[in-house]
């Protein structure tokens, strides 16, 4: 598989006695959007932590850009895979300005022209230069999540891992952030791996989805057949029913 | 039915915060009355929905100021009441489930003792009786091993469990009115359905009044009886929950429009166009 692809085969993660990922396998093609849904504790965030190199204790085969992921990835790896976390209130350093937050990954990777790159990253997420020297507490939740996306994009990754990127936001702000992610994906040719417990959000963003339960993938399907035929697995059906029960018939 | 005063009656509620530079108006002229029903208050962050709940309980933090033409609980005037009397109502008659169990539970006390403490505060009960009641309450909120969970500290329980612990704590005083501030936003859909069933039962069986504060429009439309839509501290629209999808106000329509729907895929989500005029008038 080419650049931007993700292959996971028989991924297992244990934390002491707890076996949190059990033979997880899936493949995401270059430029594809893939969703992982499931309840809290089902292991979906652990998958992202392995793929982003934050969890180094795993067995199995993981290939990123067609190259096997080592247990201790080198610096170049972190440039190609970046993550956006759920909580924009917790993921930005409260005592660093937006400028300092965005400059840090550039300094770590020794990239040139930090000034130009920071300006461009802010512009890409729809924030004007006035935000550059503010602190996170001076920004709204949606603006903070834009900064978190800018920080991920500033290293020009091929793969963006999104861990519940909008669940802490109001629905109107959620729509803006999801639209932004769609635009960026198309413009930059990004591969997206989106983790969410909201099937409607995953359905909007992704073409294929895997349903996780208790550390296993119980079903993998494309969104269209999930929409039309419902799921095969009982748990998938329950998730679909829950998302339909709370769906509004628009007038 | 006609003789009984409404459980809660609020006329022209205003909550203001005096800051050094300006006066922030969190709630601007809200009126509603609550019977034995499920009333939803929906809106985005900053719409004043949580401050409304806090004003009813006299829990608006300093330097907030609460004014209203009338604010009554079962016909009793809340505005003229002493702080002491308000405190006696709180927990026993009027309760509020806060949004975040991580910040609302005492981190250095086991969850069981916190629930038992809530019971002992309002009833003259022995410690062992309070413990029995707390265990029963944990079972009521569908916690599987109540006696094990009783002795856990808040950091040892999951978010969903913490949320249920808070609900147990608020319900143990058997309040007449429960204000639930985003009680299910941190929960998985399956647990969420169970919690809603518990609340539903309390309203139908015990005749409790429920004020359900949420930003989840589809959820309140399916669960509640009536909905008040708030924006910028003002009421935009008030309508039966089942008809929320037919809401007329531009703000309600805007909020509905930006929700993704599994069965109606769109290429791009609509975004909300805010209108300054919503904050004037009304």
Image (tube, coloured by chain):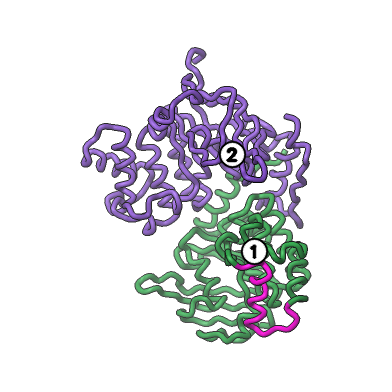
Chain colours: A green, B purple
B22 up-or-down from A63: above or below: above
B156 up-or-down from B198: above or below: below
Magenta stretch prevailing secondary structure: helix
User: What subunit carries mark 1?
Assistant: A
Give the position of the C terminus of chain A as an image quadrant. Answer: top right
Residue tagged 1: A222
Alpha-carbon span between mark 1 and mark 2: 39 Å
A95 up-or-down from B102: above or below: below
Q: Residue furthest top?
A: B3
Q: Position of residue B277 (x, y in %)?
A: 78, 37
Which residue is at a point 57% across and 73% down the rendered structure image?
A26
Q: What is the span of residues highlighted in magenta in the rendered image?
A: A96-114
Which residue is at a point 22% across and 41% down the rendered structure image?
B127
B164 up-or-down from B34: above or below: below
Q: Position of residue B250 (x, y in %)?
A: 75, 38
Q: Is residue A19 left or right of residue A157?
A: left
Secondary structure beneath dot 2 equals helix
Residue A24 in the magenta stretch? The answer is no
Residue tagged 2: B49
Viewer-nearest residue: A53 or A96: A96
Give the position of the N terminus of chain A as an image quadrant. Answer: bottom right
Viewer-nearest residue: A18 or B46: B46
Secondary structure beneath dot 1 equals strand
């Amino acid at each position: 598989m080419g650049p931007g692809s993700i292959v996971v085969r028989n991924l297992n993660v244990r934390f002491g006695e707890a076996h949190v990922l059990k033979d997880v396998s899936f493949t995401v093609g270059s430029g594809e959007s893939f969703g992982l849904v499931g309840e809290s504790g089902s292991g979906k965030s652990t998958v992202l932590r392995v793929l982003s190199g934050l969890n180094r204790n795993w067995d199995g085969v993981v290939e990123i850009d067609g190259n096997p992921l080592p247990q201790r990835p080198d610096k170049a790896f972190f440039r190609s895979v970046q993550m956006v976390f759920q909580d924009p209130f917790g993921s930005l350093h409260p005592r660093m300005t937006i400028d300092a937050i965005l400059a840090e990954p550039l300094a770590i990777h020794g990239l040139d022209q930090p000034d130009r790159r920071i300006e461009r990253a802010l512009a890409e997420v729809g924030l004007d230069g006035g935000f550059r020297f503010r602190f996170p507490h001076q920004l709204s939740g949606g603006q903070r999540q834009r900064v978190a996306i800018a920080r991920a994009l500033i290293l020009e990754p091929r793969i963006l891992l999104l861990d519940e990127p909008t669940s802490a936001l109001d629905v109107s702000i959620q729509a803006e952030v999801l639209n932004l992610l769609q635009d960026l994906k198309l413009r930059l040719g990004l591969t997206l791996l989106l983790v969410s417990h909201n099937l409607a959000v995953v359905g909007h963003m992704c073409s294929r989805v895997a349903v996780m339960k208790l550390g296993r993938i119980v079903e993998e399907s494309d969104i269209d057949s999930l929409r039309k035929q419902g799921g095969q697995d009982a748990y998938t059906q329950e998730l679909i029913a829950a998302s339909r029960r709370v769906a509004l018939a628009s007038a | 039915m006609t003789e009984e005063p409404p459980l809660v009656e609020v006329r022209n509620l205003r909550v203001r915060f005096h800051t050094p530079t300006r006066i922030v108006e969190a709630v601007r002229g809200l009126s509603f009355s609550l019977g034995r029903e499920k009333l939803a208050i929906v809106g985005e962050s900053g719409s004043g929905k949580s401050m409304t709940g806090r004003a009813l309980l006299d829990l608006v933090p300093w330097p907030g100021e609460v004014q209203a033409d009338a604010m009554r609980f079962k016909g009793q005037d809340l505005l003229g009441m002493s702080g002491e009397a308000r405190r006696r109502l709180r927990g026993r008659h009027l309760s509020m489930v806060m949004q975040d169990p991580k910040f609302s539970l005492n981190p250095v006390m086991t969850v069981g003792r916190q629930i038992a403490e809530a019971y002992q505060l309002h009833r003259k009960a022995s410690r062992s009786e309070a413990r029995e009641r707390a265990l029963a309450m944990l079972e009521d909120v569908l916690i599987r091993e109540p006696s094990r969970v009783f002795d856990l500290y808040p950091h040892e329980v999951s978010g969903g469990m913490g949320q249920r612990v808070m609900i147990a704590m608020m319900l143990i005083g058997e309040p007449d009115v429960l204000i639930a501030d985003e009680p299910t936003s941190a929960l998985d859909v399956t647990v969420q359905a169970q919690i809603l069933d518990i609340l539903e039962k309390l309203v139908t069986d015990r005749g409790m009044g429920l004020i359900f504060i949420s930003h989840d429009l589809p959820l309140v439309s399916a669960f509640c009886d009536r909905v008040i839509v708030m924006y910028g501290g003002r009421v935009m629209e008030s309508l039966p929950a089942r008809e929320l999808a037919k809401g007329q106000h531009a703000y309600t329509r805007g909020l509905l429009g930006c929700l993704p729907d599994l069965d109606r895929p769109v290429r791009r989500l609509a975004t909300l166009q805010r209108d300054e005029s919503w904050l004037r008038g009304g």
